Amino acid sequence: MQEMTQAVEYIGFKQMRRAYGFDEVALVPGDITINPDQVDIAFHLGPYTFAIPVLAAAMDAVVDVSMAARVHQLGGLAVLNLEGVQARYDHPEAVLAEIAAAPDHEATALLQRIYSEPIKEYLIAERIQAIKRTGAVAAVSVTPANTKRYAPVTKEAGVDILVIQSTVTSARHKSKSQRGLIISDLCQQMGDIPVVVGNTASYGPTLELMHEGVAGVLVGVGPGAACTSREVLGIGVPQVTATIDAAAARDQYYRQTGRYVAIITDGGIRTGGDLCKSIASGADAVMLATAFAQAKESPGFGYNWGMATPNPALPRGTRIKVGVKADLHQILFGPTSLTDGTQNLMGALRVGMGMCGASTIQEMHDVELIVAPAIKTEGKMYQMIQALG
């Protein structure tokens, strides 16, 4: 009897809540509908306004100088990885071609060797200035460990937006350093330059980062197609739940301070439907990787790999073949004859917002979401058979 009582006491040791990803939820149509060409999909980040709520991810296979310029021309924002080949090699094109040509069984080891080349500060300045010469907004990414060293270099070079990004970033970090990265200090040092920080996946850390003075928070741990953090580390929160929790922190912070901080859902977005669900979950914009890696203009030659892949001790990520599907304009705006939702992403967003009666991104935040695990299979037997055949 005593053993049974002890067992009952331990039943409540840890409670779990249900979390949801894109394929498990659906949007409820609105009471009114709006013409797609009448919805406003603009995205605001600090003093900058972008015509479309899309960022190109800071991955070497996704963004180089020319890709940053092209994304800007189409209304979005591209983020250049300052700890990748662009800041390690004077001629990164040859290095990227070597990565794309490597056999699968050699790819990770090759990446580890290539990324062992030291980062060169003069290349950081050169890349930022090259982006600015195209007329594009120069946004660059560094990891928290290197931020104190490279942030002043980016500021001197004229950077417009600084992104501090790692698999998981928090406002409170314990390390051997007596004084590690203090994000509030960094925001003050950068002055009028917006600082975006990520990645988070829950309410508390997101709210704390906002109190540090950041302009935006990246949300998503491990959902990317090239990321294996969820398998290697067991860490992650499905994107719909992660975005809802982060958006709740944004709204609470806004009520407290009157300052609006952008939520950017980063990773796992494959289709226009996923994009619409991200915005309805509370995102102000999304960060895309694989969708852009498939563009003819991308520097990865039809491949993509995560920023954590080259880690010398524990690579978390893999090089994946995504193929070259279309030019960037077609991926974002169409026209397309594909029915899988992977092209004309902005058209899908406009139509989805119109059907839900949302005329702005902020109104899309109020659209009802329902748990609907059968949303992609109900009545779709023939489509599923055709996909398998």
Image: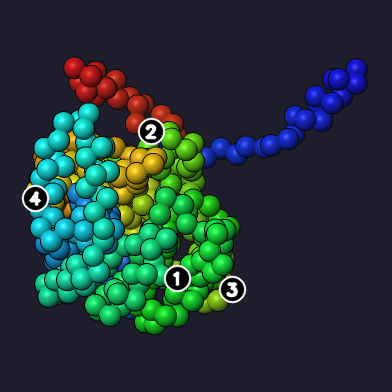
For mark 1, give the secondary structure.
loop
Q: Is residue 169 above or below residue 110?
A: below
Q: CA distance from mark 1 to mark 4?
A: 36 Å
Residue 73: x and y in percent read: 14, 66
Left or right, 146 with respect to 299, comes to: right
Marked residue nearer the N-terminal end (1 or 3): 1
Marked residue nearer the N-terminal end (2 or 3): 3
Residue denoted by label 2? 375
Amino acid type, callout 4: Ala
| Tag in front: 2 or 3 | 3
Residue denoted by label 4? 94
For mark 2, give the secondary structure.
loop
Residue denoted by label 1? 214
Residue 43: x and y in percent read: 31, 67
The reply to whether callout 2 and callout 4 are in contact (CB within 8 Å) is no
Query: Residue placed at 14% from the left, 35% from the top?
Result: 102
User: Quick one: 326 or 369, which is closer to the camera?
Assistant: 326
Q: CA distance from mark 4 to mark 3?
A: 50 Å
Residue denoted by label 3? 256
